[in-house]
Amino acid sequence: MKIINLDIVNEKLFYEKLDNGLDVYIIKKEKFYTEEAVLVTNFGGLDLEFVPINEDKMVTMPSGIAHFLEHKLFEQEDGESVHDFYNKTGTYVNAATDYKTTKYYFVGVNNFYNNLNYLLDFVGSPYFTDENVLKEKGIIIEEANMCLDDIGRVFNQAIYKNLFNNIRYDKTVIGSIDDIKSITKEDLYRCYNTFYHPSNMALFIFTNKDELEVLNVVKENQSKKEYKKDFKIQKKIYNEDLSVRKEYEVIDADSRINRVCYSFKQSLKDYNMSLEKVSNYLSIMLDSLIGSLSNFNLELKEKSIINGDINFYFDKEKVVDDIILHIHIYASPNDEELFIKLLEDEFNKIIVNEDDFNLYKKDNISYYNYSFNNLNKILYFLISKYENYGRIDEEIIKDELNINYDEFKEVVKRFNIKNKSIVSLKKQN
Amino acid sequence: MNYEIINEKNYDIYLLKTDKFKTINISTIIINNYKKEDITKERFLSEYLLLTNNKYSNEISLNKEILELYSPTIGIHDTFSNNHLKSIDITFLNEKFTEKGMNKKSLEFCFDFVFNPNVNNDMFSENYFNITKNIIKNRLLRAKEDSQSIAFFNSFNNFTEDTPIKNDVRGNLNDLEKINNKELYNYYINRLSTGKYVIFVVGEYDEKLVLDLKEILEKNINFKKEYELINNFPITKINEPKEIIDETSFKQSILYLIYKTYNLSDYEREYVLPIFSNLLSDRLFNNVREKESLAYYATSDFLPTYNSLYMYAGISRENYSKCKDLMIKELNDIKNKEITDIEFDKAKESIISRMYSSKDVIGGISSYLIRLVLFNKKTQDEIIENTKKVTKEEVKEIVDKLYLDVSYLLGGIK
C-alpha cells in the first residue's frame, strides 16, 4: 500500500491499485462516527459510442443509458432491494450520474464492513429483466420531467451543446423521453459489461478503522469476482477542435430573470504546462478579473448592468491529441450587449498584481484544510482530483499549492477568448 | 452534551469544547419580535450586512481580508418563528493551524458585520443599498421559477392554523419595493437595541478567545431583554380538508398532502412522529415509486413545532387522483397493516445514525446546542435513547391523531 503524504493538512492518504485494476483510496479519521465509501466508474452520459466488450464494432447507445443503468443496479436478483439492505442499519445509500462518471455511495455509522462488501457486490451483480427495465421507465420519465422544469439545467444544456461540435453534449445525462423508452436490457448489459470493469473504476473510503484491514476486506471481496484480464475499453475519443457549434443563441424558456453565459474553449497544448497548473492559474485569473476581487464585477453591479455577482466555472475534455479546457461565465444582465462588450474589453487587458496573486497562496492552504475538516467534503475533494487528473499523488498537490507568479503571467499571456459561444435567456413578462 | 455557560449582564455565551475539528464555529443569535411585513426587511439586512461594512467599504477589500484570514465562512441566516432569530455564523481555522493572532482577527472581522455597518449620514451606503436590492429582487424572481419551493410555500400558505408556518419566509417583491434606505437604517438601529444576544462557541477555544469575545460584546451590547421562544404551536381546530389546484405551465405536477397532528404528547412529537414519518417515507418509496412507477420521488416529512406531517410527490398530471389515493392509503396502512420488524428497525436506525453523524460536523454540534438552549429541544443522546424505546403500537396510534388539512396540487401541463 502506498502512502500519499498530505503534509499541508497533516493527513495520510492510503492508495493501492489492485490486481484487477481497481484504484482504492482510503482516508482514516479515528474520532469520527461516520464512515463512507464511494465507488466511481468512468462511465457517464457522454459515453454513447464505444466497442462493447467481446465485440469488435463501435456501437451507439441511446442517450441516458448510463443514468438508466445506475437506477437498475439498485435492483437485486434475490429480492431484497439495495435500499432495504442499507436502511436496516440506518445507512444512507444513493448514486449519481453525470456526463463523465457514475458514483455509488453509502454513508453510515455502523456495519461498515458489511456495507462495504455489499457496495462492491451490488454494483458487481447486475440483474436486468424485460419487466424490471420496463418498470423503471415510468420512474425515469418522471425524473426527466422534473429536470425539464429546472431552467438552470435547460440553460446549461444549451450552453454545452453550442460549444461542442462532436463531443455528445447535444445529449442530456438523463436522456430524451424517446431514448429512455427505447432502452433494453441487452443495451444495459453491453454497457455494464464494458464499463463496470474494475480497471475503469475507483473506490474512495472514509473510515475510522485500520486502513490495512479495510484494504484487505476490499481485496478479499474482489478476489472472489472474475473479470476479463488485460481489457482495454475502446470508447470514441472525439476529434473536437476549438471551433464552436453556434456562436450565439437566444433560447426560449419561462424565465423570470435575464441570464447570459459567455463560454470559450482553450487548448491545453497552447499553455505548455501541466493541466493541474493551468487549471489553478486560470481559476486565480478569473477570480481576480471577474470574481470576488475584481473591480469589474463591482462596477457592473454598481451601474446595475448586472444583478448579483458574475460566476464562472470551467471543465476539461480529453480529445484526440489534446485536452480542451472550457470556461463558462454566467451573469444576470440588465443590458446584455453592454455586458458582453465590457467583458471582452476586460479580457483584453488582464492585469493581476503580485500582492493579489499571493493572497491565493493562503486560499489554497485554507481550501485543503476546510476540505479535510469536513466530513461531507473529504471524499468529494479527493474524487474531484481523481476526476480532473486521473490520479492523486504528491505531484498534483505540489502543483496546486506551489503557485508561482511568473508561471501565472505566462498563462495570462497565452489566454484568449477567440473561440466563444454565447447563450442568452431573456426574462418573460 | 457538556457545555459551559457564561451569563453576563447583557448577553449569554454557551461554549462547547471539542478538539475534533480544525475549525472554530461561532454563532451570534439576535432574538427579536417581528411582524410579517418585516420578513423582507430582515432578508435585505442580512444580505446588506454581509456585502460591506464600515471597515471594508467595498467588497473587494472585504474579500481580500477574507483571503488574509484564511477564508473563514460567514453567513447570516434568518428564522421566523413566534420571534425572529438572526444568526450570524462564522467558521474559521483555529490559529493553531494558520498564524498566531488569527483567532482574534477572525472574531473582530465577524462582529464588524453586525455592529459596524457601512453607513453615511444615518443611512446605509446608497451604492450597496441598490446592489442589495437588485440581488434580492433577482433572488425573488428566480424563486418564481422553482416549482419545488412554489409548491411547498403555496401548500403551507393554505394551512388552516394561524401560525408562522403560513409565512413565506423568502420575502416578497411588494415589500421589497417599499424598503427605504433611511427607514431601514433606523429599523436596524432599533433592532440592535431591542434584541437579546446569545452566543454559541464550538471548537477548541482557549481562555484568550473567550476574553477577546467578551471584550467585543461588552463594547457593543449594553442592555438585555428576554424573549420567549415557542417550540410547540398546538392545533386549535380540525376542519374538512381543503383541496387546491393551481394551474401552471410546469411540465411536472407536485402534490402536497398536509396533515395536522392533533393532541400529540411531547414524547410523541419528539420521538414517535419522526419514526412514523421515516416508516411512511419508506413505504411511499417502495409502493408509489418502485411498485407503481408513479413518481421519481414520493416521501414524507414533519414539522413538530407546528404539529404538522406532510407527504409530497412529483407526478404526472393524469396520475393525480390515483397517486393521492395511494398516498393516503399508505398513511392509513401504518395502522391497518403489520409493521414488520425490519421496516421498524430501519426507521429507528435511520434517526439514530443521523444523530451520530451530526456529531461529526461542527455545524451539527452547534445546531443541536442552539436547539437545546433556545428551544428546549432534546440533545442527540436523548433522541438516541428515547428513539430506541418507541414501540410499534405507539407508531400505529399516531394515525388516529392525523387529520388531512390541505391537499395541494401544483398542476403541471395536462
Image (spheres, coloured by chain):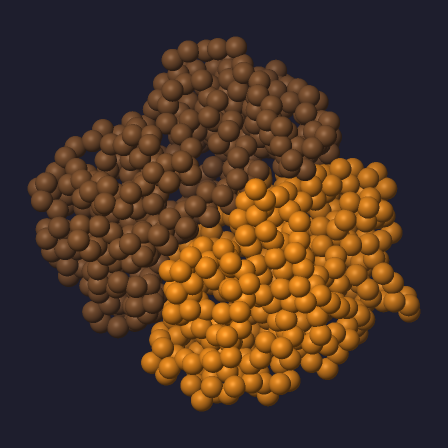
Residue in the image at 25% along x and 52% along y = B124
x and y percentages locating residue A101 in the rendered image? 67, 61
> Please, is residue B27 above or below residue A5 in the view?
above
Residue in the image at 53% along x and 20% along y = B406
Residue in the image at 64% along x and 22% along y = B324
Task: Tell me which chain appears orange.
Answer: A
Using residue B81 as the reference point, say whether residue B311 is left or right of it: right
x and y percentages locating residue B59 in the rendered image? 33, 63
The N terminus of chain A sits in image quarter: bottom right
Q: Compare residues A184 and A373 and report the one nearer the observer.
A: A184
> Please, is residue B364 above or below residue A304 in the view?
above
In the rendered image, is residue A325 in sight? yes
Q: Compare residues B351 and A115 and report the one nearer the observer.
A: B351
Task: Classify residue A158 by image quadrant.
Answer: bottom right
* Total marks in image: 0
Using residue A329 as the reference point, say whether residue B17 is left or right of it: left
Task: Tell me which chain appears brown.
Answer: B
Residue in the image at 54% along x and 52% along y = A258
The C terminus of chain A sits in image quarter: top right
Task: Classify residue B174 by image quadrant.
Answer: top left
Q: Compare residues A245 and A170 and report the one nearer the observer.
A: A245
In the rendered image, is residue A218 in sight? no
x and y percentages locating residue A251 in the rendered image? 66, 53
> Please, is residue B149 above or below residue A343 in the view?
above
> Please, is residue A216 above or below residue B203 in the view?
below
Task: Classify residue B126 by image quadrant.
Answer: bottom left
x and y percentages locating residue A130 in the rendered image? 86, 42
Using residue A142 as the reference point, say whether residue B266 is left or right of it: left
